[in-house]
Image (cartoon, grey):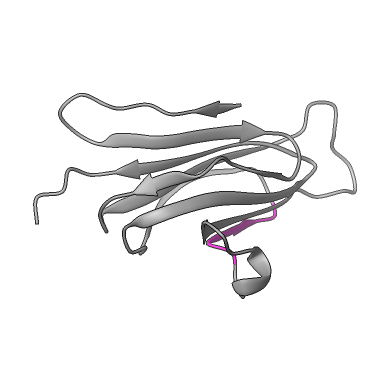
Amino acid sequence: MLVFAVGCGGDKTVIEFSGDSSERSEPFEISNKKTQLRIHVREEDGQGGEESVKFDVFVVPEGETIKDKSDPDVTEHEPESKTITIHKTPGTYILDVRSNNAEWTVSIIEAPNND
């Protein structure tokens, strides 16, 4: 599921992207450097046992692939919810999510640009 949303007066949700397998988002714009990546990763329903969660998120400039980028912006091997700051120059990006055994939601959040 892909959602574009705008908040009122404060932080802006640029994109919210959910799934349960490896997927790539539609392109989206990052307009300032005050950008956060929020993730929520949970074990896929009915799973458990030996297989662990595998989850990587790459925030990649449009037109590039993860082969052009050495490390993911986020890696998780167990259920997790967190928000991290990412340092990206303004431009057009895609989310490339690599996932196994997980349901996930990824959001890109921007603070107002008051620079």
Taking 89 as reference, is 13 above or below it? Answer: above
Give whichever of 85, 110 is nearer the camera: 110
Q: Quadrant of residue 112?
A: top left
Where's residue 30, x and y in %? 35, 50
Where's residue 65, x and y in %? 64, 63
Give whichever of 46, 109 is nearer the camera: 109
Looking at the image, the residue that sits furthest to the front is 63
Image quarter in which the N terminus is found: top right
59 to the left or right of 65 = left
Q: Which portion, as a residue range, is magenta?
A: 72-77
Where's residue 16, x and y in %? 49, 33
Image quarter in which the C terminus is found: bottom left
Looking at the image, the residue that sits furthest to the left is 115
Q: Residue at x 36, y 50 (%)?
A: 36
Where's residue 113, x and y in %? 15, 48
Taking 2 as reference, is 23 above or below it? Answer: below
Q: Residue at x 37, y 63 (%)?
A: 88
Give whichever of 106, 59 is nearer the camera: 59
45 to the left or right of 2 = right
Taking 26 as reference, is 57 above or below it? Answer: below
Q: Residue at x 27, y 59 (%)?
A: 33
Give whichever of 71, 79 is nearer the camera: 71
